[in-house]
Every structure is written in structure tokens, then in C-alpha cells.
């Protein structure tokens, strides 16, 4: 299926309530095709709920979202997205190759084995292809989880805290893989690691209390927050997340 729009993701006034609590409060942003977009915020800011709205796992109480021009949650949109959730979702008793084949088959692909072998090569996991995922290191399990998200060749990939709990070396290795990955797929990343977002992102949105405080390039966020040119993202983020008007 081809994309209908040059905008990979459009969120327009998304609202999600859980009883009296508003988890997502009028969230709007666009993500252009072929970019890596980071969604930043402290715990409870609404990032994961926003991802679930965009991927169709939740229905909004207000607003609208599109994936490559198709309504979020529709069958057409679902065929264009991949997801690597915060909780690494690999089957522990299956090998790396079996996890990938299983995922491809669930989506109805008849060339599941060939797709699995292709992803193993892209992941650089050839020597681990026959190893059960429960025996992999944390970094390799995260890499496999991402592989399961891209084995269907999605146009948009959502990565929810992909490097959470990884050591410095494993995190840097995953950064290298993500740099290569974003050449072929639009990536939406949530992370608490400011240096990660600064190193990888083309554009960034900062969320607080369920709303987007600012969205744009790091240079644009510096301007909005009143930060100095060249100031690190962590300081910019703190200014935006701790105060100021929604933008």
C-alpha cells in the first residue's frame, strides 16, 4: 500500500480521558516522512497514551489522527505501522529467527522466512539467529523487538523507550542502528534520555500534563524556550516542561 500524504503522521487536537483524568489534552503535531521525531516528557506526561492513540490501540475522545493520510486505527493505517513497545515483547522460548517468522506470519506474509533472514542481516544478529530470545542480553532483546516491528516493512515505526535499562555500549550500538533505520522508515521515539533525543532527532515535541508545550527542531525549541544558541536539549526541555504557555 502506498502513502496518500507527504506527512507521515498528523495529530490534530487529540484528547483521551480515563474517567475524570485527562491523559492527553489537545495534542497536535505533524511528522514528515523520512524523519525521526522524538516525543519527550516526564513520567505521566502523556507520551505512551499518545502513541497508543496514533497506533489505534486506543480511541480518542476528541480530535483526529492520520497515518500517511489514513485515519489512525483504520485497517489501511495499521498496515503501514510497526511498534516496538516499552515492554520488550519477544517470545522467550522462540529463537531470534522464530520470533521474526512468527511476527511476519501473524501479518499474513507468505515469505516470512525470507523476511526474517533479511531482518537478521540488517540487525547484525546472524550469530544469534538460532538462540532463544530469553538467553539474549538486554540490548539484543531490544534490537530483536525493533526487528519484529520492521519485519513487515512499515512506513512508520513507533519506538517506546527502546533503550530503557540498557548499558552505555548497548545504547550506542542501538543508536547506530536507528541512524541507519531512519533512512528507510519514519520513526517516532519516546525516551527519557535527552542526549539520545539530541543525537538522533530531526524534530522534537515536549509534552507536559498531557499537552504539547512546543514542537520543532532543537534550534526552534531553543528560541521558544528563551535558551542560548547551542544550549543542550536537557536545559531546553526543563524550561519547557516546568513552565511557560502551551505552544
Image (cartoon, grey):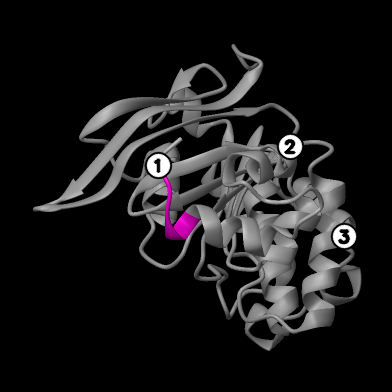
Please say if 67 is above or below 102.
above
Instruction: Return the residue nearer the eye: 130 or 169.
Output: 169
- Which numbered marker is on residue 176? 3
Between 46 and 113, the one lying in front of the other is 46
**Is residue 242 located in the magenta-colored stretch of the structure?**
yes
Question: Pointer 1: what residue?
Answer: 245
Q: Nearer the viewer, mark 2 or mark 3?
A: 3
Q: What element carries label 3?
A: helix
Residues drawn in magenta: 241-245
Q: Which of marks 2 and 3 is nearer the N terminus?
A: 3
Give the labeled residue for mark 2: 185
Looking at the image, residue 188 sits to the left or right of residue 60; the answer is: right
Relative vertical location of residue 200 with respect to residue 144 in this rendering, above or below? above
**Up/down of 177 relative to 43, above or below:** above
Q: Which residue lies furthest to the top in this view?
A: 4
Q: How far apart are marks 1 and 3 (CA)?
A: 35 Å
Residue 215 in the magenta stretch? The answer is: no
17 on left or right of 188: left
Q: Disc 1, disc 2: CB below 8 Å?
A: no
Q: Are marks 1 and 3 in contact (CB under 8 Å)?
A: no
Amino acid at each position: 500500500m502506498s502513502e496518500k500524504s507527504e506527512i507521515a503522521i498528523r495529530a490534530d487536537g487529540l484528547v483521551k480521558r480515563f474517567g475524570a483524568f485527562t491523559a492527553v489534552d489537545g495534542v497536535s503535531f505533524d511528522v514528515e516522512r523520512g524523519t525521526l521525531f522524538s516525543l519527550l516528557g516526564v513520567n505521566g506526561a502523556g507520551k505512551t497514551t499518545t502513541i497508543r492513540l496514533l497506533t489505534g490501540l486506543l480511541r480518542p475522545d476528541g480530535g483526529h489522527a492520520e497515518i500517511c493520510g489514513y485515519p489512525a486505527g483504520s485497517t489501511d493505517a495499521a498496515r503501514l505501522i510497526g511498534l516496538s513497545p516499552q515492554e520488550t515483547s519477544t517470545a522467550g522460548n522462540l529463537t531470534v529467527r522464530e520470533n521474526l517468522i512468527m511476527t511476519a506470519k501473524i501479518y499474513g506474509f507468505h515469505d516470512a522466512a525470507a523476511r526474517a533472514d533479511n531482518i537478521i542481516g540488517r540487525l547484525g544478529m546472524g550469530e544469534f539467529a538460532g538462540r532463544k530470545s530469553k538467553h539474549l542480553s538486554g540490548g539484543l532483546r531490544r534490537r530483536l523487538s525493533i526487528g519484529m516491528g520492521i519485519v513487515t516493512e512499515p512506513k512508520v515505526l513507533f519506538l517506546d523507550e527502546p533503550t530503557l535499562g540498557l548499558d552505555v555500549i548497548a545504547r550506542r550500538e542501538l543508536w547506530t542502528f536507528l541512524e541507519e533505520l531512519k533512512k528507510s522508515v519514519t520513526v517516532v521515539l519516546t525516551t527519557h534520555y535527552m542526549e539520545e533525543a539530541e543525537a538522533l532527532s530531526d524534530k522534537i515535541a515536549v509534552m507536559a500534563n498531557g499537552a504539547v508545550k512546543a514542537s520543532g527542531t532543537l534550534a526552534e525549541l531553543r528560541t521558544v524556550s528563551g535558551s542560548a544558541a547551542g544550549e543542550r536539549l536537557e536545559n531546553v526541555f526543563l524550561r519547557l516542561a516546568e513552565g511557560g504557555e502551551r505552544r
